[in-house]
Amino acid sequence: MIRNELITNAAVANTAEQPVQTDNVTIYKFGRSVYKVRAHFNLECTETLTDVVGRLILQDLNDTDN
């Protein structure tokens, strides 16, 4: 599960910059907003990343059909 934290900063440039990554935290800057993304992993999970992405794609396709 990934949890996003939004931090606004008026001093950030108006262009998207390359993400800065340390350990489980990645910082993305878009315009005047800074997103600090912290990743959490369940080591007991049996679902692979491929399974998760496939499920998300199918879910998105089903949502757009309705």
Image (cartoon, rainbow, N blue to C red):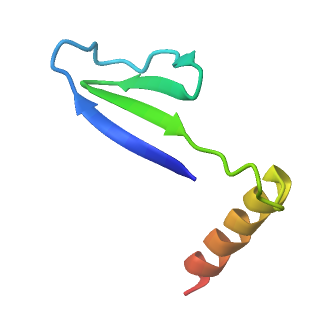
What residue is at 49 percent from the left and 36 percent from the top? 38
Which residue extends farthest front? 44
Vertical position of residue 22 compared to residue 66: above or below: above
What residue is at 44 percent from the left and 25 percent from the top? 28
Which residue extends farthest bottom? 66
Give percent across and percent down for residue 1. Answer: 58, 53
Please state if 34 lies on the left or on the right of 38 as rendered. Answer: left
Please state if 16 lies on the left or on the right of 60 as rendered. Answer: left
What residue is at 68 percent from the left and 64 percent from the top? 56
Give percent across and percent down for residue 39. Answer: 56, 39
Closer to the camera, 35 or 65?
35
Count of marks, rendered view: 0
Quarter in which the C terminus is drawn: bottom right
Vertical position of residue 2 compared to residue 6: above or below: below
What residue is at 45 percent from the left and 15 percent from the top? 17
Vertical position of residue 15 compared to residue 55: above or below: above
Which residue extends farthest left? 10
Q: Quadrant of residue 50?
A: bottom right
Give percent across and percent down for residue 53. Answer: 74, 57
Give percent across and percent down for residue 48. Answer: 84, 55
